[in-house]
Image: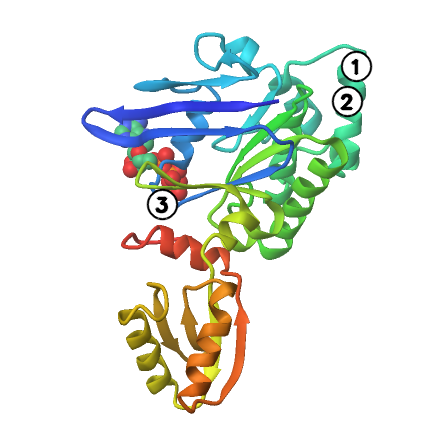
Amino acid sequence: MSVECFCLTKRYGRRVVLDDVSLEINDGGVTGLIGPNGAGKSTLIKLITGLIWPTEGFVLVDGFDAHREHTKAMRRIGAVIEWPAFIPDLSARANLDIFSGGHGRAYREKRAEILRFMELESVLDRKVGSFSTGMRQRLGITLALLPDSEFIILDEPTNGLDPAGIVEIRQIIREYNRQFGVSVMVSSHLLSEVEQICDHLILIDGGRLKAWGEIGELLDSRPRLRLRTDRPESAAALLRRAVAGNVLPPCGIENGPDGILLELGESCAGAVNRLLVENGFNVTHLAVERQTLENFFLKETAGDNGHA
Ligand SMILES: Nc1ncnc2c1ncn2[C@@H]1O[C@H](COP(=O)(O)OP(=O)(O)OP(=O)(O)O)[C@@H](O)[C@H]1O
């Protein structure tokens, strides 16, 4: 299963909301789509699912054009975008019958399997109007999974849920991916959620693709050394002079409450330590530090409102 976006651009009038985005998702994992408010996340999802047409570029799903060959391209994609408005006075079963459009034995078996997995079997005959937000989200995900999907796209699946509901949906996504090998793309404002359930990341900001790839690799792509010494201000000044004098490679240096942070890799740790010790500093801590997703997000979207 592969989704490939080629030079996707979406304009509304003169306003560019997605700008020349090219990427590929094809691994059977969980991909997190993040970005500040108005970054273009929903627009990207709607383009991938063929709900809106691109101004330029195209999307291929398993080699089929998502717009020109929509039915073939969407055969294996299940999406929940702008969470489905179920009919509150009807039971969950009746809602599924209406919205899923599936029938036949294979369909019924698949449906029973998913409902079991979602723990919705016992409430199938209850009116959806009496469901909690979490149950409604689970019913929505069930709907996305029903057409025998190999790739599901969930737009903000934990919106409006309490912490317990968020954990539940998070487990469902991760577990479903693990058990059934279904690829998932999930947009979220919650970076901690993305860090916990996703193995790949797409970061867009102002309609532009800022980062895309395996989360671990992205977070490791900006090396950081954390160190603590006595007289940290003098130590930071010494390190800045060393950078200016080409003794250390060009790098950012921050002196904060947790010590000094240098944007340098492990290979520079020895030189940094030597420099400080030779100048009479007592180095009490020196370690390579992986940046957090939050830190990565704020760096990559610097200058924006950074709602995450
Ligand atoms: N039909 C439309 N006409 C004009 N502008 C639109 C339309 N749809 C979206 N936009 C604009 O495109 C930009 C991107 O919107 P989009 O909904 O894709 O962002 P998002 O990243 O999903 O935001 P959020 O996190 O707030 O949901 C926004 O500035 C939005 O106002």
Q: Secondary structure at mark 3?
A: loop
Residue 37, which numbered label?
Answer: 3
At label 3, counting other C-alpha atoms closer than 10 Å, the crowd grade (few under 14, some 14-19, many 20 or more) is some
The color scheme shown is: rainbow
Name the residue that disc number 1 marks.
Answer: 106
**Marks 1 and 2: in contact by CB < 8 Å?**
yes
Q: Position of residue 95 (x, y in %)?
A: 64, 24
Dot 1 alpha-carbon crowd within 10 angstroms: few under 14, some 14 to 19, many 20 or more: few
Residue behind label 3 places its C-beta within 8 angstroms of ligand 1: yes
Q: How far separated are the C-alphas under marks 1 and 3? A: 41 Å
The image quarter in which residue 222 lies: bottom left
Height in image: 166 above or below 98? below
Q: Amino acid at mark 2?
A: Lys
Which tag, 1 or 3, sits closer to the chain's start? 3
- The spot of residue 248 in percent (x, y) is 37, 69
Q: Is residue 153 left or right of residue 252?
A: right
Quadrant holding the N terminus: top right
Image quarter for ligand 1:
top left
